[in-house]
Every structure is written in C-alpha cells, then in structure tokens.
Image (tube, rainbow, N blue to C red):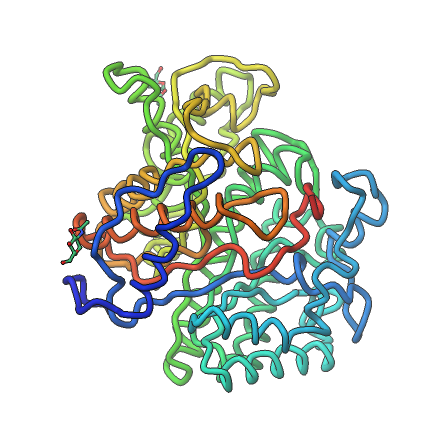
Amino acid sequence: MQSLSCVAQSGALLASISLLLITNGVNGLVTSGLSNYSFPDNFMLGVATAAFQIEGAWNEGGKGESMWDTFLHKNPDFTLDRSNGDVAADSYHKYKQDIIMVQSLGVKYYRLSISWPRILPKGTDNYINKEGVRYYRRLFKELRKAKINPVVTLFHWDLPTPLMDLGGWSNPKMADFFVDYARVAFTLFGDLVKIWTTINEIHIHCYQGYGRDYFVPAIKFSGVADYLCSHNMLLGHAKVYHLYDKKFKPRQKGKVGLTLDAFHADPKDPTKADDREAAERYLQMTLGIYAHPIYSEKGDYPELVRERIDNMSISQGFARSRLPVFTPQEVEMVRGSSDFFGLNHYSTFLMSLSRMEDGWSVPSMDHDIGVKMEHDPTWPTPGSDWLAVYPEGFRKILNWITKQYGTKVPIIVTENGLSDFGGLNDYDRVSYYNNYMSQLLLAIHEDKCNVIGYFAWTLMDDFEWKDGFT
Ligand SMILES: *[C@@H]1O[C@H](CO)[C@@H](O)[C@H](O)[C@H]1NC(C)=O
Ligand SMILES: *[C@@H]1O[C@H](CO)[C@@H](O)[C@H](O)[C@H]1NC(C)=O
C-alpha cells in the first residue's frame, strides 16, 4: 500500500517537527535523534478516541446501558475521582467541535468507536435504535465532508449490560453476538467507513477486567477468565473478519483489522541469558498469544505459550489447561484474519525472571508469565507510574513484530501518547511525540518496518477509565 522508500520531504510535517524540536521536557526529556526522514506519501496520520471515554449522553437518544455505566453507577468509588462516563467530554452533543479539532490538527484520519448499546440497546440485533444510528451516520458524514476518514472500532470495552450479565467475553456465545452487532454496523455504516478495527486491546481488557478487578467487569478470576476472554475475543474477531470479507468487502471495499496493545520488553541486563529469556517470554505471553494465531504462518497459540500454561495448569491440579484449545478448523479460521496489525504502544519495561512477586495471584497471567517488570530509573514518568518514556522501545517493538510476522501485513499504530496532570504547557507531551515519532521514522526508513499509519491518543482530555478525569 505504501512506498517504503524515502520520499520527498513533506514541508508542513517537517516544519511542525522542527518546531517541536525547540522545546525540551521539564523532566529532562531531551529531543534527540531527530532525522531528516519524513512520512511516506499517503501515510495515515490521525488522532484517536473511544465512545465511552468521550460521548457521555449515557441514557439519551434511546441508548442502552453498557457494563461501564451500570458498574460505575453501582460502585461510584471505583474511579479515583468518583467520576463516571455520564457526561464525559460530551461528544454526543459536541461532535461537530470534535471534527473542527481534528481539522485544526491538519490530520486526515480520526479513530473513534461505536457504542454497541447506543445502536443495540439490549446488545442483540432484533432491535436497532434508530436515533443512535442517526448520530453515527451524521458524525461519519460530517467527517467525510471535512475530508477526514473515520477509522472505527467496533468494541472499545463498553459491552451492553445484558450481555455482561451472560458472562461477557467469558461466554463462548459472545462471539456470535459480536458478529450480529458487526453485521448491523457494516450494513448501516459501511458506505461511510472503510477502515474497521474489531476489538481494542484484547490483552488489557481481559487481563485487567476478567483476570483482575482494575477495570470493569472486575471479575478477578485470574488465570482462568482472562484466557477464556482472550480466546473468545480471538474467535469473535475472526468471525467478524470473515463476515466482512465474504459479505461486505466485495461492495464496500474496506479493510478490517484489530488493535493489540504491547509494551516493549527489554532484558534488564542484556548480557544475562535469563533476562533475555524473560523479555522474550513476556512478549510472547502478552502479545504473541494474540498475534501468533492471526499473523503467523502457522496460526494457533505460540508453542511456548501453549506449553507453559498447559504445564503450569497440570502442576496446579487442573485436569486440563486453563488456556482453551482451538479446533483445527478454528486455527484456520483465525489465521490470516486481519488486513492490518493495529498496535497500541506507550512504554517499555525491563525484564528478569521471577517465580513470585508481591500482588500476584496463583494462578494468574502474571504468575504464568513469571517475569519481574521494572523501569530504568532514568526514564521519566511524567503522568502515570506505568508510563515511562523510552522512545527507542517503540522502534524495538515495531521491529519485534516485523521479525515475528513479516512485512506482508501492514502495521497501523492505533494509539501512542503520554498522560500528564493537565495544563496547557505540556512540554513533556510535545517531547514525547517528537521522540516517539522520530523512532517511528527510523523503524520505517532504516528498518523497513511496514508501518502505514499513526494515531495519537488522544484527541481531547477524556474519561480515562479507573483514573477518571485525573
Ligand atoms: C538534515 O539536513 C540538513 C540540510 O541538508 C543538514 O544540514 C542536517 O545535518 C541534516 N540532519 C540530519 C540529522 O541528518
Ligand atoms: C513443559 O513440561 C515438559 C515436561 O515436563 C517440559 O519438557 C517442557 O520444557 C515444559 N515446557 C515449558 C514451556 O515449560
């Protein structure tokens, strides 16, 4: 789709990067490593949001409740500032201003999500909420009028509450409900939307929501429900991919992929074999577990992941593995089920092997992975403890993905960005984007990673899940 060769400098973009160069972060971030590379022609530069984090209007226009609505109304202390998504950034009413903001950034792509319960209030496809449909059609039409391409996520975590009551993604039937919802979305919006991502961040959603109680649904059945969720999401994604491929792609001519999240993992001491093993194991067990079934030649879970969870399950007294097994037909269905590799990347950790750390449950994904995660103390963390700034890690994870799965399927960076504590003098953020995008240019031009797009998270201050508006 894209030429990888170095192309003529894009004047506007280069000018803006040079401007950014002038500022240095207050936390000692130094903008360095800038090159004269520019983004290829047709590179998809954009900004991203998600429905629950910005829309508000939680009970307006015939919308049903999502599991986040229901859970936060019942548990107001769940978020740091007791906030919820009832109003959020009020995008349901202010979407025209959102579009003006995207325009003012000069980017041609806007990644957003559809709220499943806004168009299917009960989650099922027997009743479609016309007012919800009208909202999204207006939004997509206005975007296209402004020459901005919508990139639309079907599931960015706001599951309709009635479906959560059935067990959410731990229920194997959820894949079929997801297909029903996707069919409605493709039918009603497919003339306006040409790039779809099925699911946002399988790992974070299943690990934090089903394995732990950090995110809704807060099921906290670690080492079991998280893998069920992952497995059913992979199947749901693949079924939706094939639905589009067979029934919609011939006429609508769009693309379908999914978005996976990945920290980069470096060995704590690169000279130590154990630390190198820890870093590789972390990447396989948090990214390979989802990417290998889709993007590898062979399909299915990576052998290391399969064996390790099988072994640990048996030694813990389970009669069978906690990681579900794909049938041979399912392996084939999932393999190749993506037109692009969506990547959300924010930070890097240093890894060493560990049998047990404070806060781990047994069984759990943490315990199965068995690595201690640390930050280099020289990496700044301006906004969130987990978000240490290490731009080189971005280039490294793009290279890891390229090495594992090749260059045939293009990568779209669907999220990248930095949290802070507010204010308008966000030098740390300016510096972060400057340095991370420079590393992206190196990955594209020097390493020949097939990256065709980049989306900044986020267009506006939003409801940031557990962190509320802090
Ligand atoms: C970029 O190009 C300018 C002008 O050709 C040159 O002076 C500068 O050294 C180059 N910078 C890098 C990092 O290659
Ligand atoms: C799983 O157990 C088998 C048999 O004990 C062992 O040979 C293999 O190395 C183990 N695999 C992993 C990934 O731990």
Q: Nearer the viewer, residue 46 or 450?
A: 46
Q: Outermost residue, right direction? A: 74
Residue 146's spot in the image, x, y percent?
50, 83
Q: Is residue 213 above or below residue 235?
A: above
**Relative to residue 179, is residue 16 drawn left or right?**
left
Query: Ligand 2 is located in which of the four quadrants?
Result: top left
| Residue 348 sits in quarter | top left
Quick check: 252 left or right of 67?
left
How far from the left and from the top, in percent, is residue 419? 56, 44
Residue at 38 percent across and 36 percent down: it is: 390
Q: Is residue 129 visible?
A: yes
Q: Position of residue 396 (x, y in %)?
A: 29, 39
Residue 8 figure quarter: bottom left
The x and y percentages for residue 456 are 46, 57
Is 240 above or below relative to 326?
below
Q: Residue at x 31, y 15 (%)?
A: 274
Query: Which quadrant is home to the N terminus?
Result: bottom left
In this rendering, the count of numbered labels is 0
Q: In this view of the protein, can residue 297 be seen by the observer?
A: no
